[in-house]
Image (cartoon, grey):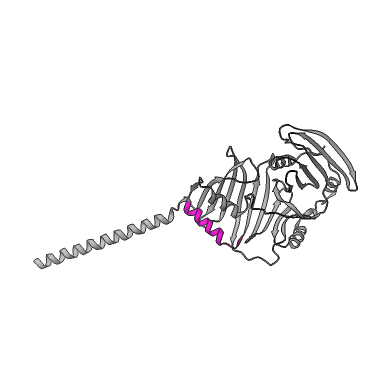
Amino acid sequence: MGSLLCRKKGEGVENLKRVFSLFVLLSLLCLALVGCGSKSSEDVAGDLAKQVEKMSGYKSRASLLLQTGKTPQEYEVEVWYKKPNFYRIALTSKQRNITQIILRNEEGVFVLTPHLNKSFRFQSEWPEKHGQVYLYESLAKSIVNDTARKFQGEGENYTFEVKADYQNRSLTTQKIVLNKSLEPVRVDVMDSNMNSMITVQYSSFELNPKFDKDAFDKERNMQAAILDSVPVVADATARKHESSFGLIEPMYLPKGVSLKGITRVKDEDGYQIVLRYQGTYSFNIMENKSQATTASFVTGDPIDLGYTIGIMTGDAKKTLRWDHDGVEYTLSGEMPQEEMIEVAKSMFNQVGK
């Protein structure tokens, strides 16, 4: 009887040991699972930096909504990036069905405007100076560099709220949403009042893709885009619009600046209009019919004007060139780049006089 009691007591102790061991094992497993599911802001930022460092490139497609002007503008954006510094960014306006391409290869940086058969080639460190909202590495850099970032890691995505560093000085904050694979889902860029001014909604993102040998070749991209583009002179109305144009004036002027004179000069292609402004800053705006052009080795940078891509050149005296609706604009003078951009943006959707 005594031996039976001892045996049962021993079995009870062993059962308690097994239950305790199982409890400890389950507790450790739960802790491990909880730890895996609740990464910190620093953890995700570190993983993102590693992914960008290791990747060989990417392809992405997204819709871009700009609300920085009076009329919202929608674009389809396709980005190809191949390390270390090859880029192809195609921006297609949904309203006008016109595509412009920013290209960077071993020959330099190009801005291609295929429907006008126009291209600029220049020496530039673009896009290193300023981030671009549609570039994955720019978004990653914004997240990694902002130590005051706000972070949410619940659900299927990671959401960061960080500083915005773009050419538009009124944009101060951006909300970047990544999925758990650290691929971009959505970006909202906001002004100081937290109004959403730019929205990028991604439809596809592919890491480490393969590219054709001539994927970043200027001639291939120019000719392919020309074939895909809608001709500017598609009908009689468009031909009439392109052959003549009215005076377009900016709606924005820097404080202390006023219009001092307007000159119309005839040339072999019709005429040029020159607007002269003086005051705090002195500058001119020249308007003439867009012509097919190939310019090489201009020192400058592509400038996103929202409705088109411009080209900024010069140091103290700067020149900003852009095309829109068959008209070429050239703004030149000694004034801050930010002011030039605001003047150019304010000329969108103005009725010719």
Q: Is residue 244 above or below residue 49?
A: above
Residue 212: x, y in percent? 68, 66
* Direction from residue 17 to residue 146 in the image, left or right: right
Q: Quadrant of residue 316?
A: top right
Tell me residue 236's x, y (percent).
Answer: 85, 48
Q: Would you place residue 312 above or below residue 86 in this image?
A: above
**Residue drawn at 73 percent across, 34 percent down:** 280
Q: Quadrant for the N terminus, please.
A: bottom left
Residue at left 70%, top 62%? 106
Identity of the residue drawn at 9% across and 66% down? 2
Q: Is residue 120 above or below residue 191?
A: below
Quadrant position of the C terminus in the picture: top right
In the image, what residue occupies the spot 88% across and 41% down? 265
The picture places residue 97, in percent across and down from the top left corner, at 73, 51
Q: Which residues are magenta?
A: 42-57
In the foreground, 61 or 173: 173
Residue lying farthest to the left in this orientation: 1
Q: Is residue 46 magenta?
A: yes
Residue 299 in the image, given as x and y percentages of width and height:
74, 52
